[in-house]
Image (cartoon, rainbow, N blue to C red):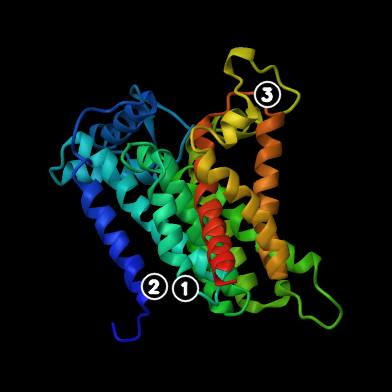
Amino acid sequence: MRDLSPALLLAMGVLFAVAIYHAQFVSVGSLRHYDEYYTLDRASSVLTHGDWTTVFSNHLPTFKKPPLQYWASAGLMKAGFSPETATRLPSFLLGIGVLVLTGWLAIIICPGNRWVAPISVLLLASSQTFWFHTLSALLDTGSVFFAYLALVASLIALKKPRWWYLVAIACVLGALQKTPVALAFAAAPVLAVEFSRGAGVESVLKDRDFRVALALTLVGIALWPAVQVAKYGSVAMREAYLSEMVDRFNPFGDGKPAQRRTLYNLIIGSEPWSRLPGVLSLFWLSWHEKRRELWALPILFAAFVVMMAVASGYVSHRYILIFLPMLMAALSAAIVTALSR
């Protein structure tokens, strides 16, 4: 504790306070969003069918989502927790982890001033969108946690290659949680460094730890789909990837106008006071810091905006959750930079 700065102590205090306050709501009230009932149904089916290698929905095999959170909720129900608590608790615990990773990312962005940690945690903790998902039985918060674990570990691994193994773990677990988005978050800093690499600078791709971790990642991500294809055939791949991912974001599909939202509502929504400055800070800091790996952050965000703009299928306003930690970390760094001047 003596080695902790006042800024980190404050960040820990904020984390503890918001965790204790919001923990009381984990078991309160019934499920609200219709996707939460899918979580309850699929988690309960693990116990009903006794098959941990298949996700069931309405007692039929479904391949829309992978099983990690369903496994966790099933284990909690088997341990005696109520269905509401068992389906929400994984999201809550991973949501607290997201707050930790947000402070960590802010320090990586602005390593010279650790006050960015408590500020970024406070900014994210003030988001109603964040707490709606963290106190729900949805899969999004867990997906965000593994994506940012992969991103933070990847940024550290560029200087400490042993961290590539943590990147591999985050990517595999992220793919088991919802989608392989953690892989994109891990790859972005690597690509940013590689494309901006000057003469005489060693390539990350030649590092032995990186290559071993990459092989482990690819094998780990392929394991669950391989089991599903072996048991049920190609329909598993079509439903999990073509229907849920490719067709949804296909710019040439036949999306229904009633399902479309304006790009402003998708990105900014009801929190313009934090998200708009966060977007500006994200692009400004990448230029201001002049560190090539940080260009991965605005590039990821820009790619997301383009995907939302051209998607022909249904896209939800909750998808922005994946970028809220990044925006709040950038905004906190911009605030500290401005105040220090």
Whether label 2 touches label 3, CB < 8 Å: no
Q: Position of residue 263 (x, y in %)?
A: 64, 30
Q: CA distance from mark 2 to mark 1?
A: 6 Å
Q: Position of residue 149 (x, y in %)?
A: 48, 61
Q: Position of residue 128 (x, y in %)?
A: 39, 39
Whether label 2 touches label 1, CB < 8 Å: yes
Q: Earlier in the sequence, mark 2 or mark 1?
A: 2
Query: Which residue corresponds to the image point at 80% horizontal and 72% vertical from the top-left?
Result: 197
Location of residue 41 by image quarter: top left
Query: Which residue corresponds to the image point at 53% horizontal and 32% vertical from the top-left?
Result: 269
Q: Amino acid at mark 2?
A: Ala
The disc placed on residue 7 is: 2
> Can you identify the residue that label 1 sits on?
114
Total marks drawn?
A: 3
Q: Position of residue 100 (x, y in %)?
A: 40, 62
- Name the side, left or right, on which 38 lies relative to 242: left
